[in-house]
Image (spheres, rainbow, N blue to C red):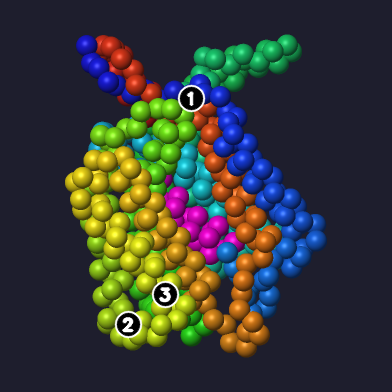
């Protein structure tokens, strides 16, 4: 007999709670402003202009959103490429989070560009010299890869269970055969998509930094650096596991499940080394370029830089070095949230705070509409996550007293 195994299964808890109702209202409010953006134009909802062509929709929804979805490729690399089977229970939730995150990265770009109906142009109008093209095409390809990686979860959920009513019942057997064929094909080729996903993620995470390198003197020297693509990639990798930890603990609390403390504690051991590498790169670059002199100026720029580095990197780094914190559910959650906050601040600072265009008549301040749409996107992601885990076997639930044959079947079905 083997005890304390876990098998992915749909969550049976009720969907609507007081918290979900509140989140639904935030989502509805965002959708109202989003509708206004497409009916009346981007200028009717935002404070963007010729001097400030982008704001929090790019800085947070796209820049930070893409980074916070990095848990998908970091856990895929850890679990599938490095074959750390002990982390198998967190791979599916991380994949779902990444899939939803990148979906709304694409929606954010679609919403932000003025002529939204031309978003299909990069698919046929390739420009290899454009950093923005590289970001766009990699996001499109990686989003496609994420949906393909999610397909085995769909086939697992519905294989042998297709039961369409009435006249549609004729389609039950063909659909079931299609699901079995798709499952067999994906089982043989999935390694290709996993490797492609990791490569594409690394490419576009770094290219987001290239976008700001191109901005040149429009960007404050504290953030403007030739190694910004590397720093963007390192920060995305560093926030991947904290994002997975936060998501797992939040889902466990929301659904009344026991946290996977042993797995999360083990996963947290990777965070401090990754944060250390990122911090070393950031501080080394600052001293090599001697931009630390700008920290002597006590102003908004230096304060926001200090908040980003101290609260978002140094403090959580110290926390993740502590064994007591790593073994504490509360400590893990707080430390992970601080890393997430640090990356949010970093992307906001790079795309908004540090950006200082010439001839700007007034500073950029996000409008109520921009803030509402951003919060609405986050709320919709949460609602969709809750819906997906109720329909599909994403979150692993404990299975007691199973034999070796059942254990093998569980592992095979969870791949």
**Secondary element at tag 1:** loop
Left or right: 391, with 290 as reference point: right
Is residue 251 in view from this perspective? yes
Q: Which stretch did the figure color magenta?
A: 57-73
Q: Which residue, given by chain and number where applicable, does mark 3 sit on?
A: 303
Q: Distance between the residues labelled 3 and 1?
A: 44 Å
Q: Residues within 10 Å of mark 2 (few under 14, many from 20)?
A: some
Question: Disc 1 marks which residue?
Answer: 11
Question: Magenta-highlighted stretch: main secondary structure?
Answer: helix
The N terminus is located in which quarter?
top left
Seen in the image, is 205 located left or right of residue 407? right
Front residue of 1/158: it is 1
Q: Position of residue 125 (x, y in %)?
A: 61, 64
- Examine the rendered structure and indicate whether residue 376 appears above or below residue 261: below
Report whether residue 224 is seen: no
Label number found at residue 292:
2
User: Could you tell me if the residues under marks 2 and 3 are in contact, i.e. CB atoms within 8 Å?
Assistant: no
Distance between mark 2 and mark 3 Cα atoms: 13 Å
Vertical side of 159 occupied by 189: above or below: below
Q: Which of marks 3 and 1 is in front?
A: 3
Alpha carbon separation for disc pair 2 and 1? 50 Å
Q: Position of residue 49 (x, y in %)?
A: 68, 75
Q: Is mark 2 on a helix, strand or loop?
A: helix
Q: Is residue 9 magenta?
A: no
């Amino acid at each position: 007999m083997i005890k304390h195994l876990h098998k992915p299964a749909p969550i049976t808890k009720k969907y609507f709670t007081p918290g979900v109702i509140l989140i639904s209202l935030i989502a509805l409010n965002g959708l109202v402003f989003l509708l206004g953006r497409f009916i009346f134009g981007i200028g009717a909802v935002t404070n963007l202009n010729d001097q400030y062509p982008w704001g929090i929709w790019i800085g947070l929804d796209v820049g930070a959103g893409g980074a916070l979805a990095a848990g998908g490729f970091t856990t895929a690399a850890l679990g599938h490429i490095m074959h750390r089977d002990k982390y198998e229970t967190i791979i599916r939730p991380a994949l779902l989070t990444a899939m939803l995150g990148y979906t709304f990265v694409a929606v954010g770009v679609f919403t932000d560009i003025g002529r939204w109906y031309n978003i299909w142009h990069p698919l046929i109008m390739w420009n290899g010299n454009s950093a923005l093209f590289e970001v766009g095409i990699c996001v499109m390809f990686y989003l496609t890869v994420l949906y393909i990686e999610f397909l085995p979860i769909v086939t697992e959920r519905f294989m042998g269970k297709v039961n369409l009513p009435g006249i549609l019942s004729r389609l039950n057997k063909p659909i079931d055969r299609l699901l079995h064929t798709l499952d067999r094909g994906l089982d043989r080729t999935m390694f290709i998509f996993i490797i492609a996903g990791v490569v594409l993620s690394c490419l576009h995470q770094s290219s987001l930094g290239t976008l700001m390198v191109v901005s040149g003197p429009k960007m404050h020297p504290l953030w403007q650096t030739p190694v910004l693509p590397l720093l963007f990639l390192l920060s995305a990798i560093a926030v991947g596991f904290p994002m997975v930890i936060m998501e797992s603990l939040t889902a466990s609390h929301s659904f009344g499940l026991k946290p996977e403390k042993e797995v999360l504690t083990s996963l947290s051991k990777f965070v401090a080394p990754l944060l250390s590498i990122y911090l070393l790169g950031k501080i080394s670059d600052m001293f090599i370029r001697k931009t630390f002199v700008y920290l002597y100026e006590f102003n908004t720029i230096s304060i926001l830089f200090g908040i980003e580095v101290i609260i978002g990197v140094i403090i959580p780094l110290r926390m993740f070095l502590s064994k007591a914190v790593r073994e504490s559910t509360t400590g893990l959650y707080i430390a992970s949230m601080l890393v997430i906050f640090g990356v949010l601040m970093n992307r906001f600072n790079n795309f908004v705070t540090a950006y200082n265009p010439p001839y700007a008549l007034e500073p950029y301040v996000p409008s109520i509409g921009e803030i509402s749409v951003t919060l609405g996107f986050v709320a919709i992601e949460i609602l969709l996550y809750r819906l997906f885990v109720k329909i599909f076997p994403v979150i692993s639930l404990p299975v007691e007293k199973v034999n070796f044959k059942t254990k093998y079947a569980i592992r095979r079905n969870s791949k």
